[in-house]
Image: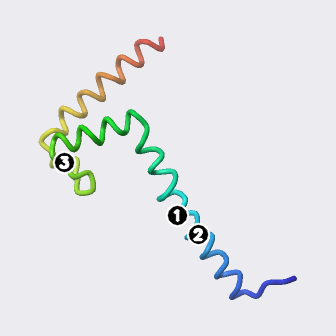
Amino acid sequence: MMLSSQTKKWLYLGLAIASVAVVWLVILPAYARQSEMSKHLQWLDQQGIDPSAMYYTELEVMEEILQRQRTKQLLDDATHE
């Protein structure tokens, strides 16, 4: 059975919407429940930072965050050598 061009377009649109829904409703919430991400989100909450409105260059605490990440990366690199 051959599908018409219009039917194929609707099918592709449906698949695209379903794909976005799976990422948004299943994968991202599962990632947010992981301990490391959960700790990060909790820290943002404690600092009063709205993650949806963050501009990294404007955050006062960004330098501290970057320094902590650099230190962690250096420690990780040192333990892997």
Instruction: Name the residue tied to disc 3.
Output: 49
Q: Are marks 2 and 1 in contact (CB under 8 Å)?
A: yes
Mark 1: amino acid: Val
Q: Is residue 13 left or right of residue 66?
A: right
Name the one closer to the observer, 57 or 59: 59
The residue under label 3 is which amino acid type?
A: Ile
Give the residue drawn at x 47%, y 11%.
81
Residue topped by disc 2: 16
Mark 1 neighbour density, 10 Å: few (under 14) some (14–19) many (20 or more): few
| Image quadrant where residue 40 sits | top left
Look at the picture and state if 44 lies above or below 12. above
| Residue carrying label 1 | 20
Q: Residue at x 65, y 81 (%)?
A: 9
Look at label 2 and name its amino acid: Ala
Question: Picture coordinates of residue 46 (x, y %)?
Answer: 18, 40
* Local secondary structure at mark 3: loop
